[in-house]
Amino acid sequence: MAPVTKGPRNQAVRKAVIRHEHLSKQGLLERAFSFAFRGLVYAQIWEDPAVDMEALAITPDCHIVQIASGGCNVLSYLTADPKAITAVDLNTAHIALNKLKLAAARYLPDYETFHRFFARANAKENIAAYKRYVRPHLDEPTRRYWEGRDMIGRRRIGGFAKGVYKRGLLGNFIGAAHLIARLHGVNPRKILEAKSIEEQREIFDRDYAPVFDKAFVRWLTDQRASLFGLGIPPAQYEALAGDNKMAVVLRERLEKLACDFDLRHNYFAWQAFGRGYAEGPDASLPPYLQAGNYAAVADRVSRVEVRHANFIDYLKSTPAQSLDRYVLLDAQDWMTDEILTDLWTEITRTAKPNARVLFRTAGVETILPGRVPDAVLGHWEYRVEDSLDYTRRDRSSIYGGVHLYTLKG
């Protein structure tokens, strides 16, 4: 499969990120991020689907259009029984991962095999299952991607035998964070042994919090390129940091992840501190990987369409008043005012009555007022109290705000 930096569709990634002159400091950072973003970024998506599905209020007649990312929420939304989901993404690797997950849900023989493939993702039996059950049903570009090699020569499908959640830009970032913690005498997995939220707090305050005061950590996190592994481009870095040092912001976000939720019920914390999902019958898992949802997900995968496309271009190809729910993840943090206005003009045109738009921001506040004209944004109601509640309950904890807009009238 062609690298994401080639071809007309993949040039859109560069357009989405790059705002400054080629040789300016900011321009060089933006081009470096564009290069980093060309491969797999998220093996697991970091938006809480439980919060999403409550906010979206999905009904059986809903057509959802969303940014695909790692595909976890695409499949998880199927548990809410929507009529259709269109998942779009500019990242070639994410498109291939979504298609792999859909084919696996449909063609793997049982829940145990499906669970091992994505919840364990570290067994050699997964490769045999891929070859026997999944590979024959993949389109040729998707097969070529998974059977091709990454930048250091590993076959990509091999990740499912050796821990795929340790791969990709985010997986590498978490691995680097673990290394830094261990160099400062901290075992990142220690908190997973806590028996209560009180014990989680004790471990965080004693072991984790002091690391963010280390001079090297403060210097490192002040470098914009250091957060590329979180999928944060230079433009989003400033929104995330605000007036604070980045080390302070990251400490606050990690504190929420470590202390605000019982770790037994938060698979995001297991990914952050354990680099995988917990084991056992009561392990916290995304909805699509839960045993009770397997039959519904497998039965409904035909409702999902995956498109390698720009979100706005997809909307422009869609008839007026044809869509019900929009999930933008944090993509708007990357956008100029002009692009935001184009996006919301198309959302407004294509929205059915009672439509809902859900998105996240690195900073706390919604970014739309003053940037999208009132003639467009005035059609929408910002659900302030609901948004604050969703932000508080989002278990991934890495975003400053979760925002819900509903169509007026």
Image: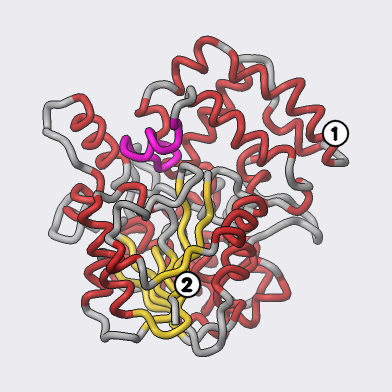
Residue that numbered label 1 is attached to: 199
Type of the residue with mark 1: Glu
- The structure residue drawn at horizontal position 67% and vertical position 34%, both measured from the top left corner, is 255
Residue 153 badge:
none
Q: What crowding class fits label 2: few (fewer than 14 Cα within 10 Å), some (14-19), or many (20 or more)? A: some
Return the residue nearer the eye: 71 or 158.
Answer: 71
Q: Which of marks 1 and 2 is nearer the N terminus?
A: 1
The image shows residue 401, relative to residue 408, as above or below, that is above
- The structure residue drawn at horizontal position 61% and vertical position 59%, both measured from the top left corner, is 385
Residue 2 in the image: state x and y as whole percent: 21, 55
Q: Say left or right for 138 vs 50.
A: left
In magenta, the rendered stretch is 228-242
Question: Can you tell which quarter of the image residue 329 is in?
Answer: bottom left
Q: Can residue 311 be seen in this view?
A: no
Give the label, 1 or 2, closer to the camera.
2
Quadrant (top left/top right/bottom left/bottom right) for the N terminus: bottom left
Residue 113 in the image: state x and y as whole percent: 63, 68
Return the residue nearer the eye: 399 or 74.
Answer: 399
Q: Can residue 362 be seen in this view?
A: yes
Type of the residue with mark 2: Thr
Residue that numbered label 2 is attached to: 406
* Mark 1–mark 2 CB contact (< 8 Å): no
**Residue 236 is one of the magenta-drawn residues:** yes
Q: Kindly report the secondary structure that dominates the magenta region of the rendered protein.
A: helix
Return the residue nearer the eye: 29 or 128.
Answer: 29
**Residue 220 is one of the magenta-drawn residues:** no
